[in-house]
Amino acid sequence: MSSINEEFFKKYLRVLKLARTPTRDEFTKIAIVAAIGVLIIGLLGFIIYVIMTAPMH
């Protein structure tokens, strides 16, 4: 069991060593794309809500 934890810890440290803080430009682009995705999913959910709760005549 400890060898599995040790192996996982080594892989985790390797990823952390390779990772770096994004530049301001990279962060801005990622934030914009994420915001657009949230808006699209929210709009889709709202459209489904309106369709499902529309009064039937």
Image (cartoon, rainbow, N blue to C red):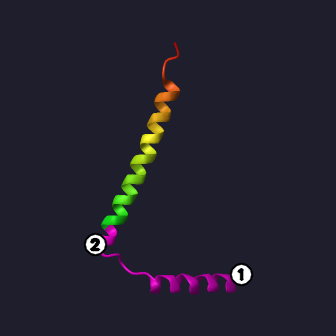
Q: CA distance from mark 2 to mark 1?
A: 41 Å
Q: Which residues are magenta?
A: 1-27
Element assignment for label 1: loop
N-terminal of the pair, mark 2 or mark 1, is 1
Residue at the location (50% across, 82% down)?
A: 15
- Report the disc number at residue 24: 2
Quadrant in which the N terminus is drawn: bottom right
Extreme-left residue of the structure: 24
The amino acid at mark 2 is Arg
Out of 5 and 56, give the one closest to the viewer.
56
Q: Main secondary structure of the magenta part?
A: helix
The residue to which callout 1 is attached is 1
* Residue 41 position (above or below residue 51): below
Give the quarter of the image for residue 35. Answer: bottom left
Q: Is residue 8 magenta?
A: yes
Q: Residue 37's spot in the image, x, y percent?
A: 42, 53
Residue at the location (46% across, 35% down)?
A: 47
Viewed as shown, does residue 21 lie left or right of 57? left
Residue at the location (50% across, 25% down)?
A: 53
* Residue 51 position (above or below residue 44): above
